[in-house]
Amino acid sequence: YQRIVLASRPQGDVTPDNFRLETVEIPAITDGQVLVRNHYLSLDPYMRGRMSDAKSYAAPQPLNETMIGGTVGEVIASNNPKFAVGDFVVGMFGWSEIGVSDGALLRKVDGKVIPPSAYLGAVGMPGMTAWYGFNHILKAKPGETVVVSSASGAVGSVVGQLAKLKGCRAVGIAGGGEKCDYVVNTLGFDACVDYKAGNLEGDLAAATPDGVDAIFENVGGAVFDAALARTNAFARVALCGMIAGYNGEDIPLRNARLLLTNRITVQGFIVTEHLDLWPQGLSELGGLVATGKLQFRESVADGLAQAPDAFIGLLKGKNFGKQLVKMI
Ligand code: NDP
């Protein structure tokens, strides 16, 4: 089977030669183990952080080992009474067509009501990120205005829809007219500002006539500054991501004084540090997807060999919705 390992650490932009595709033998499973054929690999911005050896909240991805990553796949052999051949499981098997596990960290999912790939997106880690940041940090009330950056993406798309369900005004920021059309017309946000159109501050001001009470920040830099410029007193910021700086760029903050004058609360968070809340969050998100109240969109690369290019594209905004790699 095929897998992709980290061949070298990027200096600035990620390049294809940071990865190496390898062919390896399928191992025999021992007592208690299951063998999984992965159907989808999730590509996520956090992987850029793991490729570096700079100090962070998680240890770096080791060189020459399978790249870290979430997967969903089907059990094809089992020596574990908890799993049967044909079961769909979510795991962390990485950039690999095959996974072997003792079952401890595998989550069995129903692949019929909700498509298996959704367990890597709206009903998986990105959905949980949106759910946690929205419900436990922003705590937005009906009528408040919530601004979400990277609004068409895996996390942002869920944040805005949760905000609408709560009765808030949801305003997205995204790159390009097509993404903004989707955010408003399909996801149901009240407005979306295209930060690439050249009038970010003015357009965001027009979209937030009552100011901004809550910011779900995925980007940093000029996008964050524009949202801060619109804050009302006692606004909250869920600091989820700063993708504008994932290649090591400085992320200046021009409107820092507003943190003081508007008495703003900023809370960074890492969703995997709140595993106790995942069962509740995933069950709520699963219910919303199953009943059509939560829409999502996917960008699917075909075949593991395409994963490096798809990942490089994700860091440049080429994805439109949750970025996946289909491996079967
Ligand atoms: P997305 O599906 O939103 O894809 C990434 C998007 O980021 C791109 O499509 C692009 O959208 C935007 N982008 C990329 N580069 C830049 C740039 N230089 N400046 C501005 N925008 C850029 O990814 P996710 O939904 O998976 O992740 C969204 C954010 O959430 C990321 O910052 C990620 O790190 C963070 N995150 C944090 C977690 C946590 O626990 N704190 C957990 C999961 C995700 P566009 O075309 O609109 O610019």
Image: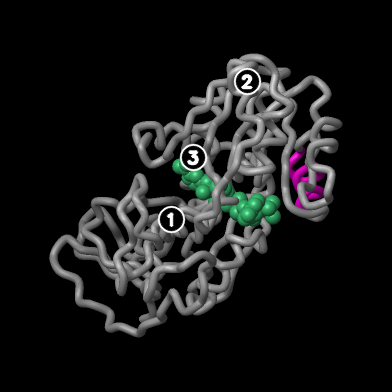
Which stretch is magenta?
179-188
Rendering coords of residue 260 (x, y %): 59, 18
Rendering coords of residue 53 (x, y %): 35, 59
Rendering coords of residue 229 (x, y %): 72, 28
Image point (70%, 18%), residue name: 232
- Label 1: element kind: helix
In the figure, is residue 273 to the left or right of 244?
A: left
What amino acid is found at the position of numbered circle 1 in the picture? Gly
CA–CA distance in space, label 2 to label 3? 22 Å
Q: Mark 2 points at which residue?
A: 235
Please name whichever residue, 260 or 85, is drawn nearer the observer in this view of the structure: 260
Tag of residue 49: 1
Please say if 17 is above or below 44. Answer: below
Q: Which colour scheme is used?
A: one colour
| Of the image marks 2 and 3, the number of the one nearer the N terminus | 3
What amino acid is found at the position of numbered circle 3 in the picture? Met
Tag of residue 128: 3
